[in-house]
Each structure stands twice: as C-alpha cells, then as structure tokens.
Image (spheres, grey):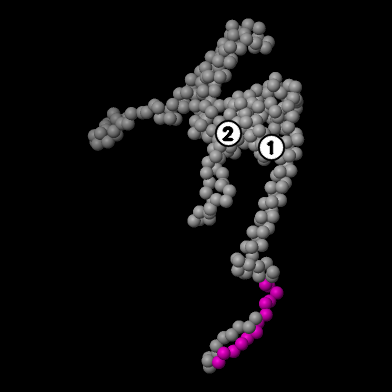
Amino acid sequence: TEIKYLRHGGNLKTRSTELGPAVTGSSLTSVLPASSTSKKSTVLSSEDRKELAKQAQVTKEERRAQIDGRYRYLISRLADGIDLSEQQVEETIISDDKFQLIEQFFAPSGLKKLLFFYQDVLQSKLNASLGPDGSTNNFPQKKLFITMGSPEDFTGTCAFFLRTSDEVITASNVSQEVNFGMFDCTNGNILQGLEFFLSHIMIPALKSQQNWGAVKEGLKNSQIQEFLYAVDKFVSTLSSSRQNIEDKIQLTKVDIDIYVRNLQSPSDYITAG
C-alpha cells in the first residue's frame, strides 16, 4: 500500500509499506466491511436450514414407521384426554426431540413413567418483523410435548403413563401394563391440581376397589383402612398447605410501638418478654 504524509516543509511524500507475516487471512476477513461477508453467511445459513429441514423430515418418517399398537394406545389416550385429534398427537410425538423416551418406556425394566405437558409455550412467528433490539416477537401457543418433568416449568396440563410391572410392553399387553392419568395445573396451581386428582379420582377409585391382591378381606382389612386413612389425611394436609400459600389464613398484625415506647427499666423488658 502507499501512504501519503506531509513533511515539515509542506511537500507531499509517498511511502510504500508491506503487510507483515503477522496479518493472516482470518485477520483480513475480520476487518472487511460487514456487507462483503454477511451475504455469504446468509446463503450458507439458508442452505443449512434447508438441509436441517430435510433431515428432520427423514427422521419423522422413520419414526412414523415405528408406530405400532403400543404407540397407538398412547396416542388415543392423549387425544381423548387433551381434546386433540389422533393425527395431531401423532405429528407432535414424531417431531419431539425426546421421542426415544417412549421406546425406553416400552423396554423391559424400562422407564417407570412417561410424561407429557400440554401448555402455553412461546413460539416465534414465521416472517415476523424484528423488534428495535433485533429480537423477534414471540407469542404463547398451546403445545403438547414429552418431558422428564423437571427442566420445564409446569403451568398447564400433565398427562402421564405409569408402568405396573417390569415386563416388556407389547401391543397385546399395553392396556393391562400401562395406566394413564391426567391432572390440571393451569396457571401453575400444582398443589390444587394434585389435590383435585387425589380427592376426586384416586381416593374414590381406591375406596371402590374390590380386589386387593393377597388381602382377601378387602376394605375390611385393618391395614387397608389405615392406608386409606393416611391418604385422606395427606390430602387434608395438602389442602391446608395450599390455603396457607394462597394467603387464605392471615395472622393479625400487632403494633409493636405501643409496647416499645413504655420500656424504661430492665424490669419493663422482662415483663414485656
């Protein structure tokens, strides 16, 4: 490059310089104007998105081919409970990144539970305009997804499947080996949802149970009665805890200043204590 500079006498002089070995290709790229590099990145990004979409479609079709009677049983229960069509549930399941948990649930000695949340999730609108800070406008939308139960906040409906044994789950035994249930925790009211589920579903079902396995006396057995009493007591405690959290029980505020102003001597402090 040529650099022009003024000498003390006022004459313009040209000096030649060369780039030293310390300047690398990456350094040159980093100082190029954004307009000369962003176009290429955008093209690559678009190609990557197309490739990812293609791979995702292949994965979905492979998963769709795996769906048998076991999956159909889960799909039908979810569709009935959440008021979605079976086609919608199927499409959601095969698109879920935790799809492999279902197969782990079916395996011998597999997962003991399989959880689904159906609740509002922030979604980015396609072709949405960017905000002043460069962010996209997100909006809440109902979504069904597989979960382990801990990473996501629970604010909607939980649908769960529980295994009754360690046997491998097959199309012929899935209805006997897998129990299905739901509880509603809309707006994050988890305690209220659990209380409703136990008091209106589980306890009535237990109290109407005729077959208690090895216990021949059934509900007349003292251990069964103690168990049902313990469950009732737990629900009662759960209800009290929920009401405390919701500020249903309020402690009376006491004006401390009245007592503090009259403290003059050590005996006054002892009396106040």
Q: Label 1 sits on what residue type? A: Ile
Q: Which quadrant of the rendered structure holds the C terminus? A: top left
What secondary structure predominates along the stretch shown in magenta? loop
Residue 44 counted in the magenta span: no
Give the numbered dot on residue 21: none
Q: Which residue is mark 2?
A: 118
Residue sitting farthest toward the bottom? 9
233 sits left or right of 148 in the view = left
Span of residues in magenta: 11-23
Give the numbered dot on residue 94: 1
Is 167 situated above or below 148? above
- Image quarter for residue 163? top right
Q: Residues within 10 Å of mark 1 (few under 14, many from 20)?
A: many
**Residue at 68% in and 58% down:** 44
Q: Label 2 sits on what residue type? A: Tyr
**Residue at 67% in and 77% down:** 19
Mark nearer the N terminus (2 vs 1): 1
Question: Is residue 112 among the parts visible in the rendering?
Answer: no
Q: In the rendering, at what x and y percent does residue 98 appear? A: 67, 38
Is 173 situated above or below 134? above
CA gap between label 2 and label 1 equals: 16 Å
